[in-house]
Each structure stands twice: as C-alpha cells, then as structure tokens.
Amino acid sequence: MKKLVIIPTYNEIENIHKIIRAVMALEGGFHILIIDDGSPDGTAAAVKELQKDFEDRLFLLERSGKLGLGTAYLTGFKWGLEHGYDYIFEMDADFSHDPDDLPRLYAACAEGGADLAIGSRYCDGVSVVNWPIGRILMSYFASVYVRTLLGFHIYDSTAGFLCYSRKVLETIDLDKVQMKGYGFQIEMKYSAHKLGFKIAEVPVIFVNRKEGTSKMSGSIFGEAFWGVIKLRFRKILPR
C-alpha cells in the first residue's frame, strides 16, 4: 500500500531536517509531501537538499505565501490521489506529533477496518505535554463544543494527526470544503462521519513544539466557532 505523509510548513527550518529523517527511518516505506508556503527562512531549500537522499520518496510543493492550513492539505490530498496513494496522512513538522505513531494510525485503517484514524489527545484522558493550561482548556472544550452542537461523538475533533483511506478523500467533495484554518480539521472529520465512514481514535501523546514558533491565532478559533454553527445546518453530499 502506498502511504503519503503531508507536512505543511512555514518557517520550520529548525525542525525540517529532523522530521523528514525521522519519518523516512520508519519501516513501511512512508513517502513525504512537504507543502511550503513561501518560508523566508529557507525551509524549502532545505527540503530540496534532502531530496538528493530521498529522491523517490520526498516531494515538495512550493506556494507563494501563507494560504492557510486547510488549503495546504486540500492541495496535498489532490496531489496524493493523482499519484495513486492508498493512505494519506496529516502531520505537523514540529514533533508535536510523534513520527513513531504513524504506523499505529496506518494499522487502525489497514488492519483495524477504519476509514479514518485520528491521533487523539483526548480519547484516553488528556494526553498533552508542555501546553499552557489555557491552551489545553481551549482545545479540549472546542471538541466538547463540536460534540454538543453536531452530535458528533469524537473526542478530539480538532486533531491534526490523521490517516485517511483513499476512498474517504475520493468521496468528500474537496472543492466544497469551506473552512481554511483549524476549523478545516473539524469539517473534514464531520464530513467523513456524515458520509458513513468508520472513524477510529488512536490515543497519542501530543508534545508542544520545542523549536520554531506556533502558527495559532485567535482568528483561527473564531473561524472554527462560527464554522461549526454553519456545519450544523449544511447538507454533506458525496462528490
């Protein structure tokens, strides 16, 4: 089975070498697609240098500026489908997601029968390390808000560490996904749920980044808050 890990980047020069080598060292032949939004710190140039070592497994798409997390993943999904990948992963570049958990997400789909596997911070208590308490509460209660409003029984609906089977991404109408920030994560999971796909939560430990800077902002949470209300009244149809 062909497996593609999509990693969006913006100014991740401190992490990019290490995260790529960590994923490439895993068994199972994971491929990586970096989608860089015009990082001025040389992230894309570092990826190009590493392509010499992983020319058949490491790919790069460069965009002209910060166009949003959701649009980066949508671009990556379409690229992955066009290139014949069977499982497509979302993952951060900053080691908040442990590369060693990628095989566990894959197994939940390929062996466990899930169509979408979520690396969940909250399905087994609260598994977050080095986040400020305010950030933990905001993230945790965002998922409570989603479950309450949408009747969507996923503990970590804002998670960004995921494994999609190909059929999920082929069925969701990617051109009609509306949210572009972290609300995108909610919309994609909810769409998969409404279209009848099996979703599994795999407990992971989320560790706050040690290097680089967070891209989180208040506007991202604002989009998610209002976007969930709109989702409540939208009809989700297959492509």
Image (tube, grey):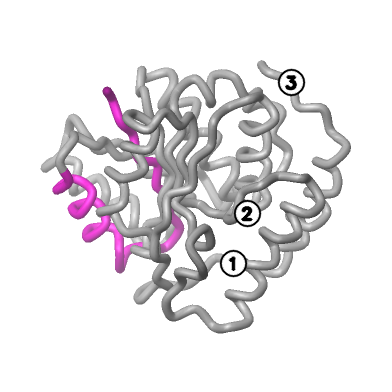
Q: Tell me how far mark 2 sits from mark 1, CA to CA.
A: 9 Å
Classed neighbour count for the residue bearing mark 3: other residues with Cα under 10 Å, few (<14), some (14–19), many (≥20): few
Q: Quadrant of the C terminus?
A: top right
Q: Find out whether the residues at labels 3 and 2 contact each other: C-beta distance under 8 Å.
A: no
Disc 1 marks which amino acid? Met
Name the image quarter holding residue 135: bottom right
Q: Considering only vertical position in the picture, is 115 above or below 231?
A: above
- Helix, strand or loop at disc 1? loop
Q: Residue at x 54, y 65 (%)?
A: 215
Residue 54, image quadrant: top left
Q: Amino acid at mark 3?
A: Leu
Indicate which disc, 2 or 1, sits on the residue closer to the N terminus: 2
Residue 8 seen in render = no
Magenta-colored span: 1-26
Distance CA(mark 3)–CA(mark 1): 30 Å
- Magenta highlight on residue 14: yes
Q: Earlier in the sequence, mark 3 or mark 2?
A: 2
Which one is nearer the viewer's eye here, 212 or 185? 185
Closer-to-camera residue (230/120)? 120
Q: Mark 1 or mark 3, which is nearer the start of the sequence?
A: 1
Residue placed under numbered mark 2 in the picture: 182
Q: Disc 2, disc 1: CB below 8 Å? A: yes
State the quadrant of the N terminus. top left
Mark 3 → mark 2, Cα distance in angstroms? 22 Å
Disc 3 or disc 2, which is closer to the eye? 3
Q: Residue at x 27, y 43 (%)?
A: 103
149 horizontally vs 98: left or right = right
Say which mark, if any, is on residue 216: 1
Residue at 34% over, 63% down: 95
In terms of secondary structure, where does tag 3 sit? loop
Return the x and y of residue 194 as percentages of the image width and height.
70, 30
